[in-house]
């Protein structure tokens, strides 16, 4: 399959509201007999959290790749603020969305430089403020060199939870209207996962957020939960409704909630404005796709 590319007529639209919509999207990988996702539709509105969950191999990661336009759907469309993402330049699309992955991408530089990767123009004051909001300032300032500490290749000198909090600080500096969290707590132990929940909430506040995860720590926060199975959405609704009706979601919840997943408050903290959207060309998969405005 050829790599996606800008079309000749692509425009310079820049996301303002951050409405994201998948409209009857179907996609099949080359040489695979069955589609990875089939007839998927979803809408994510500004300030709301949509949680996409399901078993391993259900198609969640494919949705992320389609959102980032690493592939284009065979059928259906993906829109940002009502514009088909294929009619946007890749740079413009990806400057409107931030993606946080399970594996935090850190390079062998200082903590300051790794946070500032979200916005290379950020001042030391903005970097420190982003670290504070991400609950990272405490462990950073306790290090002998503080923000000048070298993290090591891949952040090997830091714990998993510390790496994720740096990723949250970086995302706060990017300050895009759309946020995609792809398994942000997977791989962390229970204590580390709980420590990133509060900063994740601060990061999500006021943004269009799509959380792709089989980890249900934030299930109570979700405005809508979509359960994906074999590439299809088989259930959708709130946590309370889906837990009550049974089916695939109830199975996932029961398997995880045996004293492990704790209920969380649905109260949202005020949106945090720490920076402005990054507009430089994107080399790292840190963005995603779009939606039509609805009343």
Image (cartoon, helix red, strand yellow):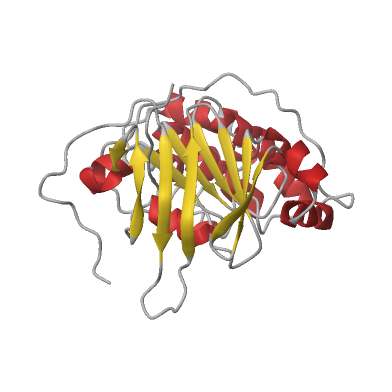
Q: Position of residue 56 (x, y in %)?
A: 63, 66
Tally of numbered discs: 0
| Residue positioned most to the right | 259
Query: What residue is at 15 percent from the left and 51 percent from the top?
Result: 7
Q: Position of residue 179 (x, y in %)?
A: 47, 39
> In the rendered image of this protein, does residue 113 appear above or below residue 292?
below
| Residue positioned most to the top | 270
Query: What residue is at 27 percent from the left and 36 percent from the top?
Result: 279
Quarter of the figure with the C terminus: top left
Q: Is residue 154 left or right of residue 23?
A: right
Residue 170 in view: no
> In the rendered image of this protein, does residue 180 appear above or below residue 255?
above
User: Quarter of the image holding residue 4?
Assistant: bottom left
Residue sitting nearer the eye, 263 or 123: 263
Q: Is residue 214 left or right of residue 76?
A: right
Query: What residue is at 80 percent from the left and 51 percent from the top?
Result: 246
Residue sitting nearer the eye, 133 or 84: 84
| Residue positioned most to the left | 8
Query: What residue is at 65 percent from the left and 36 percent from the top?
Result: 222
Quarter of the figure with the N terminus: bottom left
Residue 86 in view: yes
> In the rendered image of this protein, does residue 104 appear above or below residue 147?
below
Q: Position of residue 164 (x, y in %)?
A: 58, 47
Q: Is residue 13 left or right of residue 191?
A: left
User: Quarter of the image holding residue 187?
Assistant: bottom right
Q: Position of residue 69 (x, y in %)?
A: 33, 54
């Amino acid at each position: 399959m050829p790599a996606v590319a800008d079309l000749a007529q692509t425009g310079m639209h820049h996301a303002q509201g951050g409405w994201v919509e998948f409209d009857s999207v179907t996609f099949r990988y080359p040489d695979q007999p069955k589609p990875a996702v089939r007839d998927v539709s979803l809408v994510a509105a500004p300030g709301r959290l949509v949680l996409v969950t399901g078993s391993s191999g259900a198609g969640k990661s494919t949705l992320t790749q389609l959102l980032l336009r690493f592939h284009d759907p065979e059928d259906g469309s993906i829109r940002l603020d009502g514009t088909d993402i294929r009619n946007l330049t890749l740079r413009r699309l990806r400057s409107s969305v931030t993606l946080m992955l399970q594996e935090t991408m850190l390079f062998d530089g200082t903590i300051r430089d790794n946070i500032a990767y979200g916005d290379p123009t950020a001042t030391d004051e903005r970097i420190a403020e982003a670290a504070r909001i991400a609950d990272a300032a405490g462990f950073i300032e306790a290090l002998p060199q503080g923000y000048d500490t070298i993290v090591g290749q891949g952040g090997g000198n830091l714990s998993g939870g510390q790496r994720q909090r740096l990723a949250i600080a970086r995302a706060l500096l990017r300050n895009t209207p759309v946020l995609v969290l792809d398994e942000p707590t997977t791989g962390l132990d229970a204590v580390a996962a709980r420590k990133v929940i509060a900063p994740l909430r601060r990061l999500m506040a006021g943004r269009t957020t799509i959380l792709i995860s089989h980890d249900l720590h934030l299930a109570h926060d979700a405005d809508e939960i979509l359960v994906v199975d074999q590439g299809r959405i088989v259930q959708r609704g709130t946590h309370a409704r889906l837990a009550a009706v049974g089916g695939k979601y109830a199975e996932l919840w029961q398997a995880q909630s045996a004293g492990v997943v704790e209920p969380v408050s649905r109260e949202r903290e005020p949106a945090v404005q720490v920076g402005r959207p990054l507009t430089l060309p994107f080399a790292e998969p840190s963005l995603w796709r779009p939606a039509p405005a609805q009343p």
